[in-house]
Image (cartoon, rainbow, N blue to C red):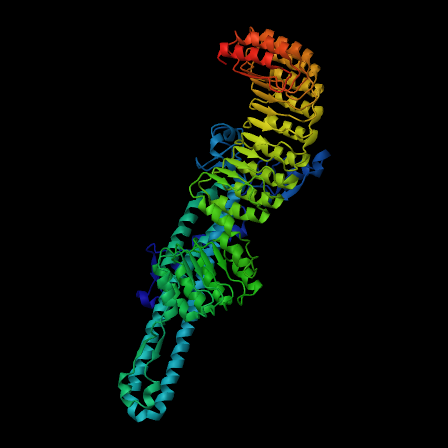
Amino acid sequence: MTSKNNGLLECPKKDGTKVEGNNINALPPNQTVRDLIQLFNHPEPASVPCHGCTTNEAEYWCDSDCKHCFCSNCWDTIHGVDQYRNHRKLHVGDRPREVPQCQGHGDHSIQFWCEQCAREICSECQQTQHREHSPVEITAYVKTIEEQCESNLEGIQASLNYRSDRADKMIIEVEKEREFNETQVRETMQNLRHLIDRREETLLGEIHQVETSDKRRIEEHKRSLQGEQQNLIEQVLNFAVVSKDKRPQRLLDARQPFQDFIRRTDARLLELKPLSRIKNHIAGVVDLTNLRNQIENMKLEPVSRHRHQVVEQKITNSANSATLDLNSSQLTDLEMELVAKELEIRRTLTTLKLYANQISDLGAQYLADVLRTNQTLTNLELHNNQIGTEGLEHLADALRTNKTLKTLTLYQNNIKNEVAQCVADGLKTNKGMETQIRNVNNVPVPRYENPQLSQKIANNGNNARLDLYSSRLTDQDMEIVAEALKTNTVVTKLFLNDNQIGHIGAQYLADALQSNRILKELYLHQNQIKDVGAQHIGKALETNRTLTRLDIYTNQIGPIGAGHLAEALKVNTTLNVLVLENNQIGENGAQHLANALTVNRSLTYIELGRNQIGDNGAEKLAEMLRTNQTLQQLWLYDNQIGDGGAQHIANALTTNQTLKEVYLGANAITDVGAQHFANMLENNRTLTILVLNSNRIGDDGVQHLARSLEHNTILTQLGLSKNGITDTGAQYLANVLRTNQTLTHLNLGGNQIKDTGAQHLAEVLIRNQILTGLDLNGNQITNTGAQQLANALNNNRL
């Protein structure tokens, strides 16, 4: 080194320091190495004073209540009595990292790191001025930075090792090529020595000249790699120093330099990509026996490019396609050079199929070399070839920088599992491909296909509504639908009702819902989802932030499934409509949902009809209504709810200020229950629709309801069809309609009202201008009563 620099040694850091070659001790010591030696000889950067006497150097750390450092004397004094004897003693060097105090709240310890503000904060800061910034716990954050830096440094080391090893192999290859060519020349020339002495000398000179040139180029490349290796060692040592420091700020301050180095080295490695070279051979040696005149024409020249007409034609035919299919074409490594050349120039190719050929390590090397710069290929299929360990290492090294390739198939090659594991361990800069390399020999299960379904989805085009109802779809078909949902940017309404979807299909859909950001309405009614399927959908609802309506009625969902959906509703903030009717949730399921709706702030519509909820379930829902401030529509028809359940709901509605519509048809509510609702209506100022059809309400119950309508000015629709109402009840309602100015729809169909009741209603219709809908179908009204009603309607222009 000194001979090349006029007897001087220059500092490796290039800071201008130079010393005479015979005075090497004058060079300044390497600061990083010196710090590292200091670190291992003295793990603590500075002595820690004893908390007790404040003068002696601390030797121990109390990891119990004290949380202080003590010298041996103070430790024995303080911890030799009472409960202090049981305190856990650690060496002072093993104490936790020091936690500084918050700048804004001096009495609070630093606990979080705010990435947006790039500063340490305490819990008080996190809950106040940094509430919208999503701070992270600082210990975990520092650990993440440490692991990321370590992983990136190891990745660079792996890349340097690969390139250095490859340079060594190429030097050996050059030497072997020289030996082969020399042997070939000498053996040929042995019988023709008197004719070719001068030419032999010339050719040998050319061979050695090419060898010298190639080796010089490779050695220069290797020296560059060694320079990068030296820089890496320095950074690794520096990282060891920083990571051992107990102060988080040290690592935080060092993060940017490490990242700058990693970024700078990655760019440098792109420049120092693995060398390639073109082999040389002696042209014309074979023909010397018969063609003496070719001796003068013999020369060392590069091997000409390989040609393959079939491959070239397929490449030409697929020029406008994103896929190049060359599978099962008996291709060898030579053809891979042609394919690699195509990858270099074509910027639209995303899928390359090369499976079931005769590609070995050299062909893999050709592909790996181009993958380092290619930024379009996402799918490379190389299974069922002859690629071994070396080929896998070529591809893995390319994947350290290539972040575009998403799928690489290499099963049914000559790759051993233990080798794949080792290669995957070094592929820390590309986590997505690391898993595929680790499982390189796993043969994938053939994918289920349904061409008709796929075509129907494709034909939907830009339609925001996708109709797949009554299509006999199974769980397997849901995998296709789910894959489409993951990439879909158009469909907002998906109809999958009346199919054969079970819990597996529900799981496929749930997985898609966790990433889909477009779908707003999902209709899954009349399937076979049950509790397990409801659990999958519930998990998806915990993270999904776009779905606003879910129809899942008639699916045999029981209390357990309702519980899973309820858990999701506790955290979901977007679902507005849940239709769960005609399942089997029972009173326990109603309790789960009631608990959820106590905290939920988004659901406005829930339909729970035909679920055997009973009075107990109605009571749980009523308790929820006392605090819920979001729900506007509650459907509870045909749920075996009697007067007790009606009382609970009515009492809750006395104070509830948000519910607007209640549907309680087809239950077991009698006049007593009707009286409870009447009492509620006298105080409620929110409810606009009350439906009590198909119950057991008679004239007495109607009398109570009519009385409440004298005071209520909010209710607009009252449903009382298919009860036990006679002419007397009709008269009660007619009397209140003379003064009520809000009721617009009254349903009295299917009762026992006759002409007299019709006459009472007809008389009031002449004057009432508010009532626009009156249903009296299915009563016992004759033509006489019907004519009276018709005349009244004509006068009222109803």
- Closer-to-camera residue (569/293): 569
Q: State whether residue 2 is above or below residue 580.
A: below
Q: State whether residue 252 is above or below residue 751.
A: below
- Closer-to-camera residue (262/535): 535
Outermost residue, right direction? 82
Q: State whether residue 619 is above or below residue 536.
A: above
- Closer-to-camera residue (680/16): 680
Residue 644, percent across and down? 71, 19
Residue at (62%, 42%) from the top-left corner? 60
In the image, taking residue 94 as reference, residue 351 lies left or right, namely left
Can you see residue 88?
yes
Q: State whether residue 77 is above or below residue 338.
A: above
Outermost residue, front direction? 783
Can you see residue 275?
no
Count of numbered labels shown in the rendering: 0
- Closer-to-camera residue (500/51): 500
Tell me the quarter of the image containing the N terminus. bottom left
Residue 302, percent across and down? 33, 74
Residue 572, quarter of picture: top right
Residue 198, percent across and down? 27, 88
Residue 394, percent across and down? 46, 63
In the image, taking residue 15 as reference, residue 379 lies left or right, namely right
